[in-house]
Image (cartoon, coloured by chain):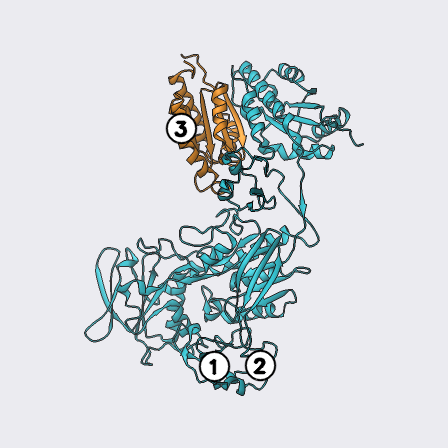
């Protein structure tokens, strides 16, 4: 039965809960209830044994309807416990849920004031303040807006691919944008993955193939994000699709073109260890298997009249005339999986990286180990001979006061894997690991360490920055370090591998700027909460996954990718509108002076400045109702719904200060 | 002076300090008799005028309790509260209200004991200062 509501006449019901003996025994209930009954606008004050029980809830519902109540005070336990319960009860009785106020007479009174008389007076004070407050409450509308269920995933490494595949469900389009010409991230350029030493390409290729063949994923390689406008549910993203100079549909990846190309430059995909042509696929097995013309080095783009690749192509797929293309897409949410970079070891002069031959980074050594790499997997020195001794130096740039103070999590396991793979290929080569602590998080890694430990020498140093490399008189690399007890040690090594740590991607600042994200003190993207909300960010609808959030192992990256996609799947459903937070800030345009203080303060970028009207306005889709703007507004133009200044002043003034 | 029960108005943020108070209460701790608790969504929501209103109404002391820096549910509302706290403290001193009568403390949801400590410390301080009007 619909109830008649006369907005001007307030009809309040006060329900006082006994909470079993909890409240009943601590207060003089009769006195409290009769006090409540005598308050302004109160048409009903009732005591009940347990309001949160089904009987209690039904009683409230019936009274709301019978007495035509348009405001309700529940004097009971903490609002943190049952505010939602009683709001729901009100809603079921046809009353706007925000017209309910909780008077917390259990936690703030019955339980904590031991004198019965004092507790009774206190309860009365709390109820009066709640009543006066609820009289001011306005019914709040839970707004709904249309949204796009589609998703943009940026970065096609481990986390991004998992996110894209998980999100690519029926009726939901996923745009997967990758900056480089191929997908798979750094992992696919490794030979094996610790601790089980699984073949990286074997486990990744099926996954990459599902991406390429998915009907719901539109893969855009060699592309980057230019601009993002909008908010959760409704983003408009501009993407620059760089000119690949190849017709991806016509090309079959036969490789005739790069054999014909006369240019030779360092191959960055092999960490500069060999050369590639100007027209190239990043590495053998890269997907999609379509070359790209590196226009910086291509003779034709330097003004010469070369068309060797075009002439060699049996399918006429080369497109010199292709231009960069700007695409505009509409999505509801964005998952950032933009990955990481590795610490540049030439910053630490003592390691001699870049100065001495045969001093490699971990990524370079991954390529040396790779059967498709520059040495086809053979561990050789620059002079093509097999090394008799290899030193592995851990924590390069990590856990250091001077460089990065954090641990990169994955390098210890990678060093153990290197040790194991070197011993397998060159059983007589001596391997020495210099480490200061073994970080062995993750399933199976301690067992892996136990397995590898006996195969190599492990030198435990007090700190990674105690190690130096120089060339001795015989021209050999000499590694000098100090053991945990401070004993100086030095030995020769034919090859040195520097285990460089994970650092934020060079594009992290740019991406953070585009989406308005915060970064942590180390430059990684900031999550909403490290423990409870590791994939969401302060910006609703922008999620993060993988190493762009911080160093982590592959399984964590994959889990985070799936988790981010899960948030998208449950947050935006095709054909359904999204419900917005009702208790948001509201700006009174007549009072706003246009000072923009609120715009700067809002942590969610939910306040925009309307340049024409010269006033601020709140985007209810982004506002979370923290109220930081309302308390800072010098004109008193902003109020937080359900926590308006007037409501709070009234609460302050109606407590008993006798 | 022993009979003086100071009136404290405390603004508690919904996510941390209000939860700590609930926890302290369920552990059957004792609160000061004359404490009025006002729930706010965030310590950053507390307008300095609320503090002035509480003093005007007759509070002997006012407290703002928020999440620890770095733990704010709304990222950094507590930092904003801190900035205002320092300014407001100076202003209160100009008005003749002793600095000790106004306190900002960080209390996480798990810190029931800290909650009890900061409120009883405040009560003790106010007892030694005496009622605000005198």
* Residue at (22, 66) in percent of width and height: A490
Dot 1 and dot 2 residues touching (CB under 8 Å):
no
- A479 with respect to B90 (left or right): left
In the displayed orientation, state which residue is furthest to the left: A473
Residue identified by numbered label 3: B89
Indicate the chain coloured orange by its letter.
B
* Residue at (61, 28) in percent of width and height: A102
Q: Which of the labelled discs sits on residue A330, or is there none?
A: none
Chain letter of the residue carrying label 2: A
Chain letter of the residue carrying label 1: A
Residue A399 place in picture, x, y as percent: 34, 55
Residue identified by numbered label 2: A317
* Residue at (57, 86) in percent of width and height: A314
Q: Secondary structure at mark 1?
A: helix
Q: Is residue B102 above or below residue A298?
A: above
Q: Secondary structure at mark 3?
A: helix
Q: Secondary structure at mark 2?
A: loop
What colour denotes chain A? cyan
Label 1: few (<14), some (14–19) or many (≥20) C-alpha neighbours in 10 Å: some
Q: Tell which tag, 1 or 2, sits nearer the viewer.
A: 1
Depth check: A256 or A502 in front? A256
Query: Rounded to the nearest whole Å, what is the CA distance between mark 1 and mark 2?
Result: 16 Å
Depth check: A478 or A360 in front? A360
Q: Is residue A337 above or below residue A388?
A: above
Instruction: Work out whether residue B109 can be spotted.
Output: no
Q: Is residue B116 above or below residue A295?
A: above
Label 2: few (<14), some (14–19) or many (≥20) C-alpha neighbours in 10 Å: some
Label 3: few (<14), some (14–19) or many (≥20) C-alpha neighbours in 10 Å: some
Residue A21 place in picture, x, y as percent: 61, 22
Query: Rounded to the nearest whole Å, what is the CA distance between mark 3 and mark 2?
Result: 73 Å
Residue identified by numbered label 1: A300
Residue B33 place in picture, x, y as percent: 49, 19
């Amino acid at each position: 039965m619909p109830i008649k509501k006369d907005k001007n006449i307030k009809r309040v019901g006060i329900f006082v809960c006994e909470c079993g003996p909890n409240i009943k025994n601590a207060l003089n209930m009769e006195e409290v209830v009769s006090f409540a009954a005598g308050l302004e606008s109160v048409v009903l004050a009732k005591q009940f044994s347990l309001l949160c029980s089904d009987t209690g809830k039904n009683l409230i519902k019936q009274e709301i309807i019978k007495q035509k109540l348009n405001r309700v005070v529940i004097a009971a336990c903490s609002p943190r416990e049952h505010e939602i319960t009683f709001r729901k009860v009100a809603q079921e009785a046809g009353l706007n849920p925000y017209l309910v106020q909780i008077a917390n007479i259990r936690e703030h009174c019955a339980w904590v004031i031991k004198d019965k008389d004092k507790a009774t007076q206190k309860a009365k004070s709390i109820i009066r303040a709640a009543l006066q407050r609820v009289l001011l409450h306005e019914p709040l509308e839970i707004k709904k807006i249309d949204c796009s269920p589609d998703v943009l995933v940026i970065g096609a490494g481990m986390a991004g691919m998992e996110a894209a595949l998980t999100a690519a469900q029926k009726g939901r389009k996923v745009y997967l944008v990758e900056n480089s010409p191929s997908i798979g991230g750094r992992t696919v350029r490794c030979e094996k993955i610790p601790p089980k030493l699984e073949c990286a390409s074997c486990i990744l290729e099926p996954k990459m193939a599902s991406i390429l063949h998915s009907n719901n994923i539109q893969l855009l390689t060699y592309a980057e994000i230019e601009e993002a406008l909008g908010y959760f549910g409704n983003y408009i993203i501009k993407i620059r699709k760089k000119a690949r100079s190849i017709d991806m549909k016509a090309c079959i990846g036969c490789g005739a073109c790069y054999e014909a190309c006369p240019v030779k430059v360092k191959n960055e995909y092999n960490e500069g260890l060999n050369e590639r042509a100007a027209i190239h696929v990043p590495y053998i097995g890269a997907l999609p298997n379509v070359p790209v013309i590196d226009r910086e080095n291509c003779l034709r783009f330097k003004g010469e009249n070369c068309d060797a690749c075009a002439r060699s192509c049996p399918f006429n797929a080369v497109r010199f005339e292709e231009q960069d293309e700007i695409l505009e897409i509409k999505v509801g949410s964005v998952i950032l999986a933009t990955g990481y970079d590795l610490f540049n070891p030439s910053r630490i002069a003592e390691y001699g990286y870049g100065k001495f031959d045969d001093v490699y980074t971990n990524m370079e050594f991954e390529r040396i180990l790779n059967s498709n790499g520059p040495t086809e997997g053979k561990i050789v020195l620059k002079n093509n001979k097999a090394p008799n001794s290899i030193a592995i130096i851990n924590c390069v740039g990590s856990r250091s006061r001077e460089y990065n103070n954090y641990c990169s999590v994955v390098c210890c396991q990678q060093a153990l894997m290197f040790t194991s793979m070197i011993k397998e290929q060159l059983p007589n080569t001596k391997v020495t690991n210099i480490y200061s602590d073994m970080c062995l998080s993750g399933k199976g890694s301690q067992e892996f360490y136990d397995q590898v430990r006996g195969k190599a020498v492990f030198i435990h140093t007090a700190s990674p920055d105690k190690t130096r490399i120089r060339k001795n008189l015989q021209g050999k690399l000499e590694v000098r370090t100090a053991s945990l007890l401070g004993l100086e040690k030095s030995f020769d090594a034919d090859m040195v591998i520097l285990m460089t740590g994970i650092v934020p991607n060079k594009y992290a600042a740019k991406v953070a700027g585009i989406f308005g994200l915060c970064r942590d003190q180390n430059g990684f993207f900031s999550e909403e909460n490290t423990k409870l909300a590791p994939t969401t960010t302060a910006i609703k609808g922008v999620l993060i996954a993988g190493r762009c959030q911080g160093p982590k192992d592959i399984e964590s990256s994959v889990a985070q990718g799936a988790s981010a996609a899960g948030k998208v799947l449950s947050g935006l459903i095709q054909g359904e509108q999204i419900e917005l937070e009702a208790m948001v800030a509201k700006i009174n345009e007549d009072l706003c002076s246009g000072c923009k203080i609120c715009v700067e303060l809002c942590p969610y970028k939910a306040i925009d400045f309307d340049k024409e009207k010269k006033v601020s306005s709140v985007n209810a889709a982004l506002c979370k109702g923290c109220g930081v703007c309302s308390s800072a507004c010098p004109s008193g133009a902003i109020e937080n719904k359900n926590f308006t200044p007037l409501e709070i002043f009234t609460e302050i003034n109606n407590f008993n200060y006798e | 002076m022993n009979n003086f029960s100071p009136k404290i108005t405390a603004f508690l943020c919904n996510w941390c300090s209000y939860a700590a108070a609930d926890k302290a209460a369920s552990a059957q701790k004792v609160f000061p008799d004359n404490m009025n608790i006002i729930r706010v969504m965030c310590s950053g929501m507390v307008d300095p005028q609320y503090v002035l209103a509480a003093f005007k109404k007759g509070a002997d002391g006012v407290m703002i309790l928020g999440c620890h820096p770095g733990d704010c549910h709304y990222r950094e509302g507590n930092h904003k509260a801190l900035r205002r706290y320092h300014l407001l403290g100076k202003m209160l001193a100009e008005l003749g209200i002793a600095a000790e009568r106004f306190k900002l403390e960080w209390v996480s949801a798990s810190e029931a004991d800290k909650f009890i400590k900061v409120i009883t410390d405040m009560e003790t301080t106010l007892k030694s200062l005496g009622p605000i009007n005198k």
